[in-house]
Image: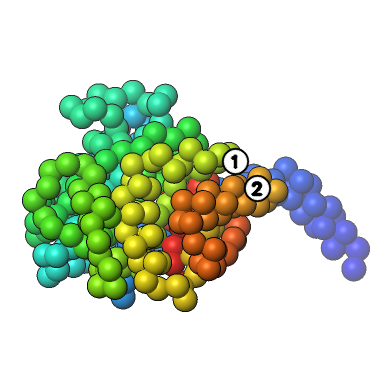
Amino acid sequence: MKPIVPILGLASILWLFLGPWWLSKMVCSTGETTTFNVRDGKFNAHSAETFSFLKSSDEIQFSKGTEAAFKKVAKHLKDNPNKQLMLTGLYDNDEKNASSYENLGIARAERIKSLLIKYGANGDLISTTSTPTDNLSFDKNRKMLGGVQFLFADGDAGNDDSSSISQENGNSDLGASSSFDPGSSMFLDITEVSSEFAENESFKNYFADLKNYLTNNTGKKLYVTCYNDDSKLAKNITRKVKATIEKLLGMDEISIRRKVGKEADSPNGVAGVKIEIR
């Protein structure tokens, strides 16, 4: 039994020096994996890996699996000419913009739009916009996972305005025939207790159809999920977002549920709030 003692001692010494390094590699590799998922009602385009952008760049990188998901989205648009897709690109104000667009958010959204057109989608059905954020996550290689949000809606094509999804529909009397897709969701860059998100153009577009839909479907529940590693902050954010939406809706009978989750579980792998109907 005695020879075992030196071996265990040596193993303990090796673990003391190499253990922390091995564990850090395991944690880092786990945190860098984020899936790609786009939903529109029963339609779902999924990939085990998502696309990525380098910091201060609109050059997109993606796997074969993600390419297949892009092609599926393009085909969905091609097969449903009544659909419109809004692409919202995220960017950090600290990033350097060398693109020909106003900001990197637009440039990144336009990059994905060009891919979808390449795969067969009608460009007239796709609009692009952007939103700045101060909490984009870049890894040690200056790479950001995701960075462009997808939002489907029904409406007329051919409007080149970046808010074509669709304030016109939101201001019209849709009545009981509202074509709002309850499968769509909205992800907002909310990392502090504030109601400023209500002024976000993408939110206004989504909320207009959302309100019309809920007016005629009072049995539905609205879920507000805050993804933030600070659970206490996440709870306070969901309370504020819930209260703001309730005030905007003006409907006491609408049930709004609050949830919290880790940042790594969010649609884009960053802190924020997702709004959806179930």
Task: Identify the residue shown where x is 70% and y is 48%.
Answer: 232
Q: Position of residue 259 (x, y in %)?
A: 59, 61
Question: Of residues 129 and 161, which is closer to you in this image?
Answer: 161
Q: Is residue 85 above or below residue 42?
A: above
Residues 170 and 186: in front is 170
Q: Residue at x 33, y 23 (%)?
A: 96
> Circle 2 sits on which residue?
236
Extreme residue toward the right, this view:
2
Q: Position of residue 76 (x, y in %)?
A: 18, 67
Q: Residue at x 44, y 67 (%)?
A: 277
Gap between marks 2 and 1, in whole Å?
A: 7 Å
Q: Amino acid at mark 2?
A: Asn
Foreground: 29 or 56?
Answer: 56
Picture quadrant of residue 262: bottom right
Q: Earlier in the sequence, mark 2 or mark 1?
A: 1
Residue 268's spot in the image, x, y percent? 43, 51
Q: Which residue is mark 1?
A: 193
- Mark 2 crowdedness (10 Å alpha carbons): few <14, some 14-19, many ≥20: some
Amino acid on which disc 1 is placed: Val
